[in-house]
Each structure stands twice: as structure tokens, then as C-alpha cells.
Amino acid sequence: MIRKNKFIKISTLMTTCIIGMTMNGCSSTSNDISTLDSSNVTLITKVLPYGEVGYAMVCDFGDTVDASELKPENFKVEVTIDDKTEERTVTKVYTNDEIDLSEESKEGQYVVIELDIEDENASTIVFEEERFLNDRLGTDYTVTQNTDIKTKNGKTFKSSEDKIKKSNIVTPIVDEFEKLTYKDSSGNTMDYRLFEPKTENNEKYPLVLFLHGSGERGSDNEMHMLGNEGALVWADPKQQEKNPTYVLAPQVPAADELTMYWTEEPNYTTMLNLLKETIEKYNIDENRIYVVGMSNGGIGTWNIIEKNPKLFAAAVPICGIGDINGLDLESEYIPMTDYSAFKNIKDMPIWIFHAEDDPLVDVRYSRDAEKAIKELGGTSVKYTEYKEGEVMPMGHFSWVPALQNQEMIDWVFSQSK
């Protein structure tokens, strides 16, 4: 009987520990002392104008944390890229009641460790010049707890020299896009992301089609969301509050040779069929379809509106080429003499952006497009050209200031066929 009671007590203690670990997500060493568990460490990334960065680490302590002693020195955060480990600068530490960023500390079980976005290793993305592609490499994060952390219920999480790996990644806005693959009747496929606004019954909403640049090609259905803000500015909560809209962001695969891929088959037709199916499937206002593209996507923007002038209410081509007839990416600039490509879009609201010192796409292509439309009698075209040295780190990145232009965003949503 004694041995049976002893077994019951041991079993009960083990069950209690297992339940405690499940509820708190932490390794328990006694009733009042625990250590942080890797399953409860989340990396928060954020897509900024120049792409995704490691923005914060969030540790779940399973119980309301005493925030009175929290400071940056409590934690050490490191990232490993290409087998090289570097420390990130911790700028702020605070508690929250959810895995999220907050302007103010809120009581809760989560400790948010914010990081300096200016760190040399803040970016999660590495550009491979030979392939002209971005790769996502900088998400291998660890956190080390340098000091004891106490909860308001008296539990202590002991400091440790262990590097605790993140087990999850959260990327605000990006995570709200559904990750999908489209297949047309010919068997051609295209990965894409779709953002749906908060809708009301029978109400129709506009749609923004975003065409990415060359660095964001691939088959991951991610890089065209992470490389820049091109798709995200339209889905940002502040923009959605003013202008709820669908956002469609297709991704083309990365071929061995860099070409004007949005204008070529099967990419062009597959993308167009995806757009048309999306319009039919959702509550979309067919009088308010917009297209925005940058670099190679800017070329694609010109191409799709020229071939489908009645489909779009407005377009924003950024550092693109208005008429690609007889051109390829290796061509030298050829002055435009034939304006026929612009004849059917001369009255479409178009806002062109380019930088004077763009080293990859000659600014004269955008100047020629504006000139052609105006000489054909068009009065709805707008053109913004950034002066030499105004766009950093080089002139090709004109989408950075363009997408920060609230006047442009409001202008787009004001257009209707």
C-alpha cells in the first residue's frame, strides 16, 4: 500500500509538471523556477521600404511578467548568415499581452525585444548579383537570457548562457495575404498572394494588381512580398481604413536568363487570366481596377494597360519602359518616334515615376512616354522625376519614395472608369 501511494504521488507530480510545461511553454525545474523554452520564442520581421528586416524577438513566459526590471541588457540577440554569427543591437524591451508590437508596454506574458533596424545585419535578404535575385537568408535568430526574469505570480525564469532558437516567424501585413497557386485551362501555373479587405455584404471594392521587379522572381511565393513594400502599402491597416481594397500580387518563376518576363508567354497570359478570374470570383468593383509595377514590373505595367486599355482605371509604372517594341534588356536607349503604342491609353490616368540617375533603366523611356501621351492629346498623365542623388542607395530605387507618396496613393483610389 505504501508503494502504491508513493507511485500515485510521483505520477501526480509528473502529470502536474507536464501540464505546467504545456501551459507555460517552458521547462520547469521546480514549482517556482523555470527556464525559457525555444518553442516560445518568435521572430517578428517587418517589411520596410528597402525590404524585410529582423525587427524584434518575442519570448512567451506563460505568465504575466514583472516589467519593472526589464531593460535591453537582459537579453542578447544574434543572427547567423552564411555560417557567420553577429549580435544585433537591442533597443527596447517591454511586455505585451500578445505576440505583437506595441507603442506602449502592456501587462502580459510576452516580452518584446526590439532591435535596431540600422544594424548591418538587420536585413533578412541578400542580393545575388550573378543571378539578379534576392534570397532570404537572415532569419536564423537566437536569444540569450542574461538575467533572471520574474513573473507577478512569483515564478523565476533563470538566466542561462544557452542560445535559444526562434521557432516561429511573424511578419505583419504579409501574413494577412493568402498564399495561393493559380492554374489556367492550359495547365500553366503561377504563384500569387491575395489580400482581402474587410468586406460588407454586396459591397464592391477596388483591386490593386502589383507587378514585382526582377529581384523578386522565384517559386517561394514570398520574395515579391518581402523584397519591398510594393504590394504591402495598399494592404497597410491605415490605408485599408481609408481605402479598403483587394491586393493581387503574382510571382513569376526565375528563369536562367533575365528578360522582360511580364510581357512574355506564358507569364503574360497566365497573369492576365489570374486577374480576370479574381475579378469574377470576388466582390470587386470593375470600374476601379488599378495596376502598379516597378522596374521589370513597370515594363509589365505599361504592357498590360496598352493591351487592355478598357480594363484599368489607373496605372502607376515606376522606372519602366513605355514601348518595348524592338527592345530587350541589353538594348541601348533608342529615341521614340512612333507613338502608336500609347494611342489607346492617352486618356487613362497614369502616374509615372523615375529617377534622373537610374543606372539600369534609362530615364528617357519615361520621359518619352509622357511626351508621347501629351502629344497625342492626353491630359491625365502625371510624371514625377527624382533628381540625381535624391534616391538612395542608387537611382533605380525610385519605388521607395514613390510608394511613400500618400498623394499618389490617394490619387489612385480617386480614379474610376
Image: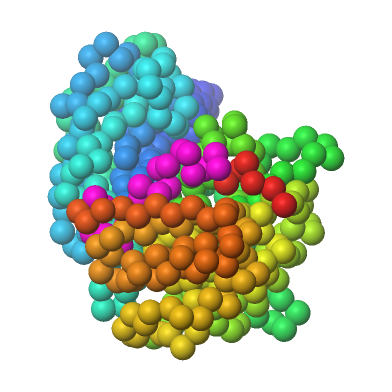
Let me know if residue 391 is in the magenta part. Answer: yes
For the magenta stretch, what is the residue range? Answer: 390-411
Tag count: 0
Q: Residue furthest right?
A: 202
Q: Nearer the viewer, residue 52 or 372?
A: 372
Question: Residue 393: image x %, image y %?
Answer: 22, 55
Residue 151, picture quadrant = top left
At x 70% / y 62%, what residue is drawn? 311
The x and y percentages for residue 395 are 26, 60
Q: Nearer the viewer, residue 128 or 232?
A: 232
> Which quadrant of the view contains residue 132?
bottom left
Q: Residue at x 46, y 38 (%)?
A: 406
Classify 116 as above or below 64: below
Answer left or right for 31 relative to 237. Answer: left
Image height of 215 relative to 69, above or below: below
Q: Find residue 339 and report its horizontal and vertical position in percent.
A: 53, 76
**Residue at 73% in and 38% down:** 199
Most foreground residue, 331 or 151: 331
Task: Identify which residue is drawn at 26% across, 78% down.
Answer: 130
Rendering quarter of residue 361: bottom left
In screen coordinates, is 252 left or right of 161?
right
Residue 237 x, y percent position in the rendering: 54, 34
Return the residue nearer the eye: 264 or 253.
264
In the displayed image of the protein, which residue is found farthest to the bottom? 326
Residue 371 at least partly seen? yes
Tell me the colour scheme of the image.
Answer: rainbow
Q: Is residue 235 visible?
A: no
